[in-house]
Structure formats: structure tokens, C-alpha cells
Image (cartoon, grey):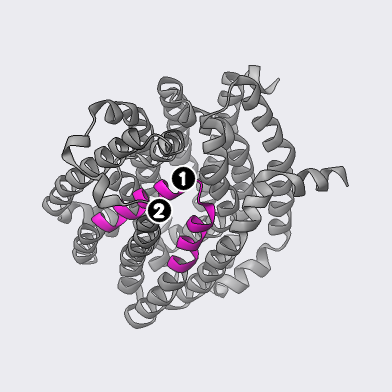
Amino acid sequence: MKFLKDIIGAAWFKISSLNSFAILLRIGFGLVISKVLAIYVGPAGMALVGNLRNFQTSLESFATLGFQNGIIKYTAQLKEDNKQFKKLISTVSITIALFILLFGIGLFIFREPISFYLFSSENNYEIIIKAIIFSLPFYGFSLFFTSLINGLEKYKKVVYISIIGNIIGFFFSLFLVLNFNVKGALFAMVLAPTTNFFIASFFVFKEIKLFQFIRLKFFDKRILKNLSSYSAMALFSAITGPMIYIFLRNHLIDTAGINTAGFWESMSRISSYYMLFVSSLMSMYFLPQLAVSNEEETKLIFRNYFKTIVPFFLLGIVLIYFCRNLIISLLFTEEFQPVSSLFFWQLLGDFFKVCSWILALHFLAKRQTFAYFVTEILSYSMLIIFGYFAINYFEAKGAVLAHAVTYVFYLIILSINFRKYLF
């Protein structure tokens, strides 16, 4: 009973409860879209969707130069200081706008090799890259606006953005997939998130007189310097992680065929749904908390996380494992039954990932750039080397095995680094 009281009384639980409807709605819509994708595009189409999903993860960080976590932190710190707050908004807005312009030009120039790498030479999906270029400003500023609202601690409005965006995105995606199959699914992934820009704009303009804040005279290089460490960390992960997964998925396609790669992508989609419960708490609650915490408060945050979040998550994934065949039948078709063999290692890896997340978040919250890079490089090296050879021997099961081994290794490294906070 005490365990349940601790969970129900925790601040993270109250925020999670507030956010739970948005998460469940997103998962519900995601389940329907997964079923539609399984029927209309099959495992092969799912593999292409997976490559675009990883590429889009990189783009979202690039569109804001990886500033999101820094924006949340400095908004929380500077919101009462009108002069510094104006400098923050002006500096970020101007920098993002200029970078998106240059980055969009670069994508247009290299659209053919990018399309070939993501979708292979057998398909002409260059138009998808053009759609991405069109969407970049919407990506960048929707994420910027949402980070501002998050930093202002207007959690309800962050949730509203998520709910409204998911509803619009769901029906838009459903229409495109049903009418245009694989290409429709790819267009939906690129264009559906752009609706969040208009929703986030509505809420941010109610909080801030944004156009009065954005002036060239308020541009401050010192703010850009402070944000640069967040940018370096976020962009490193945004480039390295997704590109490794695209590389491994392409290697799996070459080794075992595109359908097998589609099975791995299907497992990854299932994982992304239940991981939402923890990842949303990371940015919405734990990052602002760690950003302003001292050493003793950090120890308390870590202890509470491992006493409440981790056991709660463990219970959830055990239930998922025993219901795996039911989940596959609900989400996909009979063709996807091989996904069942991937659950154990994927769930095990996700458990260690959740254990390590709170520790890795400390690097971002405290701008510990060097330690962050060392641990990330070591873990990504393990993933790509072990993943490459594991796929050669075990095909799709090798990919999820590499995921599990990597996060066990990552947690050990972080535990050593944060031993004085944990033990």
C-alpha cells in the first residue's frame, strides 16, 4: 500500500495523469494506423516507413538546432526577467530561421542521394524529400513554441497541443494511407506534424506577445553560446542514433530481405508506444526539475525515479510480454507473426533504457557535454558493431539483441559515472 501511496502522491504521477489522456489518445491512434499500415503496405512498406521515421527524428532536432532542452531550461530560469527573456526568444527565433533556410537548400541539393539511401533505387520517392523541405519551418517553430510553453510550466497547454495535433494528424494520415498506400504513409509522416505549428502558435501567442519580442537588437551571442552545449549534445544524438538504425535496417534488408526488416520496424513501433509514458515525463517533468536541482535534490530525484517509475514500467512490460501474440493480432496481420520472437530482447533493452534515461538526462540538465559525448560514443559504438555482426547471425533477432546489450552496457557506464548519486 505504501508503494501505491508513494506513486499516487508523487508530482510526476499528477502530471502523468494530466498527460495520460493525450498519451493514450496518441497510442490509440497509433494502433489504428499500425493496423492500416500492416494491411495496406505490408512488412516491406513498414521497413521504408521505419527509415523515414528515423530520418525524421534527426530532422526534428536539426530544425531547432537541438535547442529544445536548452529552451525549456532557460525559459524556466528567465521567464521573470523580461529583458533576458526577450533576448532568449529573439536569439533563438532568428537563429532557427536562418539555419532552416540554409539546411533546406542543402537538402534540396542532395535530395537524390538522400532518397536513394532511405528508399533504395527501386522506388522514386524524391518527392518525399521535397515535402520534407517544405515542412522544415513548421517543424522548427512548432517545436520551439512547444518548448517555450513547457518552460513556462503551462503543462495543460502542452497537453492540448498534443491532443489536438494527434486528432488532426490521425485523420490526415488515415486518408493518405487509405488512398495512396506506401507513398501516402510516407507523406503522412512528413506532413501530419506540420499541423502542430498552427496549434502551438495559437497557445504561445496567448502567453507571449511574440512579435514584440523578436527584434534584431535583442539578439545576444551569449545566449547562443549557452545554448550551444545543448545543441551539440542533441544534434550528436539526432544524427548518430537514427543514422545507425537506418544503417542497420539497410544491412538487415541486404542480409535477410525487406520483409524481415519490416518485422523489426513493427517491433520498434510497438516499443515507441509504451515508451511514450516515460519519455513524456522526461521532458515535461524531470528535465526542468534536474535543471534547477542541487546535489542533494538530484539524489532525491534519482531515488524517487527508481522507486516509482522503474517498478511501474517493469510491471507494464511484463504484461506486454505475456500479451505479445494478442498485441500482434490486434495491431498487424497474420503475416507479422514472426514479430513475436523479437519481444523478449526488445523489452529487456527498453527496461535498461528507462533505467538509464534519468541518468543521461542529468548531462543535458547540467550541460555536462564532455561526459555526455564519451558515454554516447561508447554506447553507439557498441550498437553499430554488435548490431552489424548480430544481424549477420540472427537477422531481426540480432537487431533487438544488440538493442538489449547496448543499453545494459550504457547503464553500467552511467552507473559508474553517477555512483556518488546512486550508492
Observer-nearest residue: 233 or 47?
A: 233
Residue at coordinates 60% horizontally, 33% vertically from top-left? Answer: 408
For residue 10: magenta? no
Q: Are marks 1 and 2 in contact (CB under 8 Å)?
A: yes
Can you tell which mark lies on residue 207?
Answer: 2
Q: What's the residue at 74%, 50% (across, down)?
A: 315
Q: Identify the residue under disc 1.
A: 152
Inspect the image, locate mark 2, and give the three-letter code of the amino acid beneath it. Answer: Glu
Q: Is residue 41 at least partly visible in the picture?
A: no
Q: Quadrant of the C terminus?
A: top right
The stretch of residues the image draws in magenta is 137-165
Res. 98 image quadrant:
top left
User: In the rendering, at what x and y percent does residue 205 appear?
Assistant: 35, 57
Task: Return the residue found at the far right.
Answer: 1
Q: Is residue 146 magenta?
A: yes
Could one spot residue 214 in this view of the protein?
A: yes
Left or right: residue 146 compared with residue 90: right
Q: Is residue 115 above or below residue 239?
A: below
Which kind of residue does numbered mark 1 sit on? Leu
Circle 1 SS class: loop
Magenta stretch prevailing secondary structure = helix
